Amino acid sequence: MADNVGEKHGVLERFGLWLAEWSEKWFPDALVFALLGIVIVFVFGLLIGESPGKLAIQGGKNFWILIPFTMQMAMIIIGGYVVASSPPVHKLIVALAGVPKSAKGAITFVAFFSMITSLISWGFSLIFSGLLVRELTNKVKGMDYRAAGAAAYLGLGAVWALGFSSSAALMMATKGAIPPKLYEISGIIPLTQTLIIWPTFWTAVVLILISMVIAYYSAPSPERAKTAEDFGLKFESIDMSIEERQKPGEWLEYSPILTVLVVALLWWFLFDVFKTSPQGALAALDLNTYNLIFISLGMLLHWRPKRFLRAVAQSVPATGGVLIQFPFYAVIFGMIVGTGITKWLADLFVSVTTQGTYPLLVALYSAILGVFIPSGGSKWVIEAPYVLQAAIDHKVNLGWVVQIYNAAEALPNLLNPFWMLPLLGMLHMKARDLVGYSVLQMIIHIPIVFFLCWFFAQYIPFVPPMK
């Protein structure tokens, strides 16, 4: 019986690796998907009768419209890195790495912390989980490095968008981040209608438990594992020490005085924001306040400006894809909302769905689109106008529509390696080493996510747009 189980796991592992190798060979860079999306939307617009000039003008006019949102997304990555790499948090990671005693237990342990930390911040989750895997390679013998790396990525592929760094939820709660034409449709959707509701909690709990079970039973036994040593890797603990001060003018860079003063000022401001929010403290948690919390906390944890700046410099390369791709996604957004494409798609959604089937179509559409547009925030900007308009027509709760999108859009992250890049860099791995195990998770997650999206939609009443 044990041999049969082992063979079954071997088949799943080989199938996953085959998928990963195929993806690595045939999948183009994520930027190509963005550029291809522009061409597809342009051609689609022509087919439904839009003029090529109008499509081009509306696309170009909106090239820079997502600049505030782009900066906010980049700051999430930077904020997550500076907190996770700070000395106090790194000491916690080292302590946690001493808890698991078995290889399968270690991989499940990584999966749990990857998902829990992703509910706080997906940027923080990637760095925290990657550092945890690196520490575990030195403490747990026989741990499969590929399965551990995939477990570290589970936060991005399972529940991150149900947490407090959800691009879509935070955008819809931040009036300044919502493109004006989208605001005309949806108004503001506060976090108390998206993240802070009981269906979101239970969806996250179910996905976390199922993901941990899959991680445990799919992990190879020690005798069949491919460890970090098999990859020729040996990791030392992260070194955040700074060189000795050489010049008198550098003393403020090495002193915590300015850090303490500035963080105190910023936290005074944050306290006032939460205290005076007319809709309650939770409603004040938008992209700007969220990023300010992480940046100021990172400053405090690094203590000295010199160390904080070093951490920021190390985090910046991971923001490159966001910075260059979001303007091209804005072109797609412009062509959709600036022409008749939005109405055409909204009418299609209304005509082919009922109030009961609408959640399933949104989940399916969001998951498929996510394969080609790997950014949750930019993809939401593209589909939100017609998805939310159709939701209003069907009287489906707008906040839960955002959460349907969030739960479904995480699924393609398990296939598309775009957001794996920071983690892969930390672990010195290739996407194909992880995707076999992440695709296994995706196959099991799909029917569960779709059912939960449909089920909870039946019990949340419709609330008109808040403007």
Image: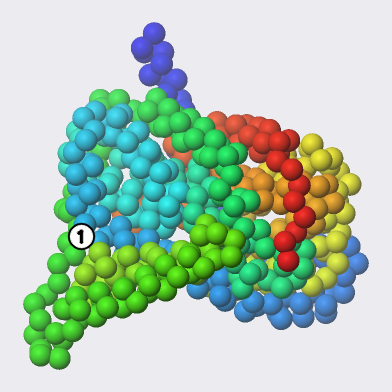
Q: Which residue is mark 1?
A: 87
- How far across and how far down the image is residue 167, in percent? 55, 59
- Label 1 CA crowd tier, 10 Å (few <14, some 14–19, many 20+): some
Split into 4 quadrants, where in the image is the C terminus? Answer: bottom right
Q: Residue furthest bottom?
A: 249
Its colouring scheme is: rainbow
SS class, disc 1: helix
Is 435 situated left or right of 230 in this image? right
> In percent of the image, x 8 and y 77: which residue is there?
244
Residue at position x 87%, y 54% from top? 347
Judged left or right of residue 153, residue 405 is right
Question: Is 347 displayed left or right of 328 in the figure?
Answer: right
Displayed quadrant of residue 320? bottom left
Q: Nearer the viewer, residue 218 or 348?
A: 348
Q: Can residue 99 be seen?
A: yes
Q: Report which quarter residue 100 is drawn in.
A: top left
Q: Residue at x 42, y 43 (%)?
A: 115
Percent coordinates x, y for residue 276 in the rendering: 51, 68
Looking at the image, residue 203 lies above or below residue 275: above
Q: Residue at x 78, y 50 (%)?
A: 391
Q: Amino acid at mark 1?
A: Pro
Relative to 366, does residue 82 appear above or below in the rendering?
below
In the rendered image, the quadrant that contains the N terminus is top left
Question: Would you say residue 29 is visible in this rendering?
Answer: no
